[in-house]
Image: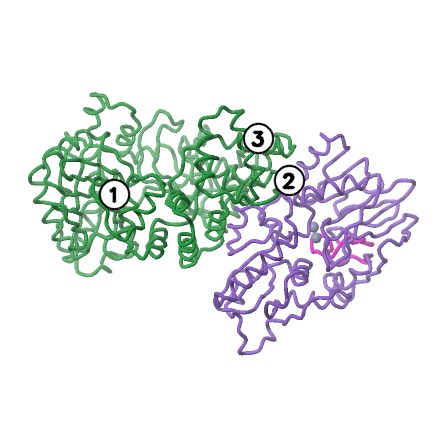
Chain colours: A green, B purple
């Protein structure tokens, strides 16, 4: 655990990419495979399920330190993170634990699940007694399911590749899909030769697009690009190999069971691997249903006939990564596309479709077509270089997403709550309201419609923080209600009628576009205006 | 009441003087020379003898400053006044005020950890103790100083190996000198920002020994910044002044660095937990050592500390000062 704690601190202490890679590489060069496997597991963002509640952890730490409950709560609010607050509240530590990481995980952490609350408390307090400050913090993060470290999959892949002297792409491929953090897995991950068991259901890493911020004309000749609609569904990879079918979502989750209609249609495919989008489809209108419909279906435990009929899901395929057992990712997009069309010819039908290519002679034509995105239920365009290979991860240059501008309204800040992590102690989580009537209506009120956390600069956050502290009208728990005075422009991606919300609408991905210091609250938008945006 | 709060600050009616007034007054008794305690414009100042030099820099060349050695008593209009080391910065003092059988101690800012650049905190018994509460939460417990200075030394050496200058932000009065006195000066050359340089001179004039360091403005043309440690005030962060050092690693020395979120928000590479204010255990032990029946709490987590003390059976109150209701971002720089 000491080595891993040092690695965590080294990663936390730098924003420099090469230093992060060097720190991980040094770790992998040095750590025994049993520990390294767990390190890969944690660094790749996998976490054991939360074993106990963060609140309990804080309470136990406070009890050990002889601190009353209310003071524990106040301390937590100043820290903004339970695992950290618990570590800071504990009495001084003696020495660091030399026990290896895998032993801590398998003997000290995972078994907590089997214990009742009293047993968990005893085990956690005993563990604290053996760990130093930094280790306690990590341990707390791990058992509350909150472990995070600022390392991308790409950096981890590079560090492992450097340590094993293997190509990045091979490591990236081996890291995909389902695996257990065993020493055997780590040996396989870093093994110089390709292993037989790698092939079966293992997906390829997804190639992700960059948002296009410049004008599309900067991309040059439109003829060099393949343009498709940008679908608002779930990115997925369909694998058809040796008579078996696997469906993976971008979250590296095996979702084969959830979409029986897609899997059934895929049975008619020859051996290949397809990249595409899962969408809840409206067959009458021949367009996607809102994303919320797909989300609801994901939330269902059991797929009833009614769900399958009401929210049918299709796969819109847009790329082909493997054909007849051969990796096609290095071939140019035009070739892959042609092969994709051939492959789908055998199986195309209602559930497995080709994502159409949008033809246009100029960027200007595309720009006006893009204006129809909302009525088509899409988010704009994907623009892909016809000669591009299928790369790994988010790379600039070949794939761009040209999204439509979000909706926006001017809304009034009415509640604020303190943030966590980097923003601990600052009021950063805001609730915004809109008017129930037009200006001049004496009976009109402000009704909350959305919460937003992000979008302001650090300087602006401090400004709003000061405003909140000096304009508090009421406190309830961690939330303060403030004098309605600040107007901000709030953007969101989609809007839907909802009877679960007081405002009568639900918006998707609300975020702050900017402070509107130039506007008084009288000039903020009305709920009716917001509702008029529902199509 | 021996001391009361007016719109000018803490006032002793019997002696007709103020302690750390925030507006100009006739006679100001000063705990220490930080800006929030020593304001310009009063007609007469009284401070502990070692603090005269740094107070002079704050109050101006013409300000009438009288001094008093630590521990020796003087009377102002029949009220006995004496200064006792607060361990906060050079010349910082707890002010003991005694009159009519009643003894008050105004701690100003203080810390109980030792500091080679100033006299160590000495508990003074009293009836009423006025304490600060900047770090009045149990999460604030300072790690052993030797450990912190070792971490700073290690960071400096690692930067040297990586060919990067080490820029350490520390409050110019007190923290900067404590850092300079605590690090291993044999590692490489030391440079300081002008604001720090001026105060270093005042410290040296008062007999505090500091390692040799060069004012950045006097650095030779061909200086190799990558081997250097540069100490600058937090206000220098993000300014063009830093460009001359080329590739650099930035760090911040403050008690606030105990919390990871604060550390990251500071947008520096490293945060070192080093404070000139008292931590939670030190606060409780100082209050106990004062033997006071009544404790007035000001500056920081006042409500929290008051509630805690009351639950422990002490007669405690908040003393309202013109500071924010709870510590916010702006406090980061002076702690
Ligand atoms: Zn001070
Ligand atoms: Zn102060």
Chain ID for label 1? Answer: A
In the foreground, A64 or A513: A64
Q: Is residue A153 left or right of residue B177?
A: left
> Which residue, given by chain and number where applicable, does mark 3 sit on?
A59
Tell me where residue A477 appears, x and y as whole percent: 55, 30
Q: Is residue A506 left or right of residue B325?
A: left
Q: Is residue B222 left or right of residue A186?
A: right
Chain ID for label 2? Answer: B
> Which residue, given by chain and number where applicable, does mark 1 sit on?
A379
Question: Could you tell me how many numbered marks the image carries?
Answer: 3
Segment tinted magenta in the rendering: B24-45
Q: What residue appears at the point 57 percent right and 48 percent down from the top-left corner? A: B329
* Crowdedness near tag 1: few (<14), some (14–19) or many (≥20) residues, C-alpha within 10 Å: many
* Crowdedness near tag 3: few (<14), some (14–19) or many (≥20) residues, C-alpha within 10 Å: some
Q: Residue A116: which numbered mark, if any?
A: none
In the foreground, A270 or A509: A270
Q: Tag 3's secondary structure?
A: helix
Find the distance from the CA under tag 3 to the CA under tag 2.
16 Å
Q: Is residue B219 left or right of residue A111?
A: right
- Our reading of the magenta stretch's main secondary structure is loop
Q: What residue appears at the point 66 percent right and 58 percent down from the top-left corner? A: B175
Which is closer to the viewer, label 1 or label 3? 3
* Crowdedness near tag 2: few (<14), some (14–19) or many (≥20) residues, C-alpha within 10 Å: many
| Label 1 vs 3, first from the N-terminus | 3
Find the distance from the CA under tag 1 to the CA under tag 3.
46 Å
Chain ID for label 3? Answer: A
In the foreground, A65 or A484: A65
- In which quarter of the view is residue B253 placed? bottom right
Tell me where residue A32 appears, x and y as whole percent: 41, 48
> Which residue, given by chain and number where applicable, does mark 2 sit on?
B137
């Amino acid at each position: 655990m000491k080595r891993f704690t040092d690695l965590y601190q080294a990663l936390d202490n730098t924003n420099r990419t090469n230093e992060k890679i060097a720190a991980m590489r040094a770790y992998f060069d040095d750590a025994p495979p049993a520990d390294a496997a767990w390190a890969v597991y944690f660094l790749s963002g996998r976490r054991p399920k939360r074993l106990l509640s963060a609140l309990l952890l804080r309470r136990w730490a406070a009890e050990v330190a002889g601190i009353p409950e209310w003071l524990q709560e106040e301390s937590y609010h100043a820290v903004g993170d339970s695992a950290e607050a618990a570590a800071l509240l504990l009495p001084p530590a003696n020495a660091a634990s030399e026990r290896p990481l895998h032993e801590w995980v398998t003997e000290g952490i995972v078994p907590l699940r089997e214990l009742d609350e009293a047993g968990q408390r005893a085990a956690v307090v005993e563990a604290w007694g053996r760990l130093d400050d930094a280790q306690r913090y990590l341990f707390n993060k791990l058992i509350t399911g909150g472990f995070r470290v600022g390392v991308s999959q790409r950096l981890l892949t590079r560090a492992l590749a450097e340590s094993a002297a293997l190509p990045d792409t091979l490591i990236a491929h081996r890291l995909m899909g389902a695996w257990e953090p065993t020493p055997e897995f780590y040996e396989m991950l870093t093994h110089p030769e390709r292993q037989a068991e790698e092939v079966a259901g293992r997906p390829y890493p997804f190639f992700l697009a960059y948002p296009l911020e410049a004008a599309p004309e900067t991309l040059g000749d439109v003829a060099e690009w393949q343009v498709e609609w940008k679908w608002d569904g779930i990115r997925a990879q369909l694998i058809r190999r040796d008579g078996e079918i696997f469906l993976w979502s971008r979250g590296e989750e095996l979702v084969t069971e959830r979409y029986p209609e897609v899997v059934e249609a895929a049975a008619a495919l020859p051996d290949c691997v397809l990249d595409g989008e899962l969408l809840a489809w409206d067959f009458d209108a021949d367009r996607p249903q809102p994303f919320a419909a797909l989300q609801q279906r994901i939330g269902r435990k059991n797929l009833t006939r009614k769900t399958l009929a009401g929210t049918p899901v299709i796969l819109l395929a847009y790329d082909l990564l493997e054909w007849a057992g051969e990796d096609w990712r290095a071939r140019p997009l035009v070739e892959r596309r042609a092969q994709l069309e051939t492959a789908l010819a055998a199986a195309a039908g209602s559930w497995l479709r080709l994502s159409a290519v949008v033809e246009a002679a100029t960027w200007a034509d595309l720009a006006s077509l893009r204006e129809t995105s909302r009525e088509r239920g899409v988010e704009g365009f994907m623009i892909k270089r016809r000669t591009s290979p299928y790369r790994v991860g988010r790379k600039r240059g070949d794939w761009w997403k040209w999204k439509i501008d979000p909706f926006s309204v001017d809304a009034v800040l009415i509640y604020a709550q303190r943030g966590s992590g980097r923003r601990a102690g600052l009021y950063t989580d805001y609730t915004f309201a809109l008017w129930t009537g037009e200006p001049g209506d004496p009976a009109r009120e402000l009704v909350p419609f959305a919460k937003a956390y992000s979008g302001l600069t650090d300087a602006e956050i401090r400004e709003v923080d000061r405003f909140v502290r000096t304009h508090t009208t009421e406190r309830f728990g961690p939330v303060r209600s403030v004098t309605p005075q600040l107007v901000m422009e709030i953007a969101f991606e989609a809007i839907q009628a909802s009877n679960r919300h007081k405002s009568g609408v639900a918006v998707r991905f609300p975020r702050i576009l900017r402070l509107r210091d130039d506007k008084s609250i009288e000039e903020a938008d009305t709920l009716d205006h917001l509702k008029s945006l529902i199509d | 009441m021996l001391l009361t709060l007016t719109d000018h600050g803490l006032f002793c009616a019997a002696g007709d003087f103020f302690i750390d007034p925030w507006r100009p007054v006739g006679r100001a008794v000063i705990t220490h020379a930080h800006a929030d305690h020593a304001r310009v414009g009063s007609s007469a100042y009284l401070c502990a003898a070692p603090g005269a030099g740094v107070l002079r820099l704050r109050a101006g060349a013409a300000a009438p400053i009288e001094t008093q050695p630590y521990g020796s008593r003087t009377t102002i209009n029949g009220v006995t006044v004496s200064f006792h080391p607060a361990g906060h910065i050079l010349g910082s003092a707890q002010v003991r005020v005694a009159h009519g059988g009643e003894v008050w101690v105004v701690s100003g800012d203080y810390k109980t950890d030792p500091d080679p650049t100033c006299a160590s905190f000495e508990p003074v018994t009293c009836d009423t103790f006025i304490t600060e509460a900047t770090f009045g939460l149990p999460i604030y417990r300072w790690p052993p100083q030797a450990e912190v200075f070792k971490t700073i030394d290690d960071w400096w050496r690692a930067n040297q190996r990586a060919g990067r200058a080490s820029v350490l932000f520390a409050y110019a009065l007190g923290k900067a000198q404590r850092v300079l006195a605590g690090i291993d000066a044999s590692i490489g050359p030391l440079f300081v920002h002008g604001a720090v340089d001026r105060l270093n001179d005042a410290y040296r004039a008062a007999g505090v020994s500091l390692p040799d360091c060069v004012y950045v403005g006097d650095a030779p043309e061909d200086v190799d910044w990558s081997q250097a440690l540069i100490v600058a005030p937090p206000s220098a962060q993000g300014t063009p002044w830093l460009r001359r050092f080329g590739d650099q690693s930035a760090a911040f020395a403050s008690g606030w660095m105990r919390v990871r979120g604060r550390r990251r928000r500071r947008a520096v590479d490293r945060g070192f937990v080093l404070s000139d204010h008292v931590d939670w255990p030190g606060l409780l032990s100082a209050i106990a050592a004062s033997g006071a029946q009544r404790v007035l709490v000001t500056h920081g987590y006042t409500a929290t500390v008051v509630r805690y003390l009351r639950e422990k059976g002490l007669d405690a109150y908040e003393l309202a000062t013109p500071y924010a209701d709870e510590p916010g971002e702006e406090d980061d720089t002076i702690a």
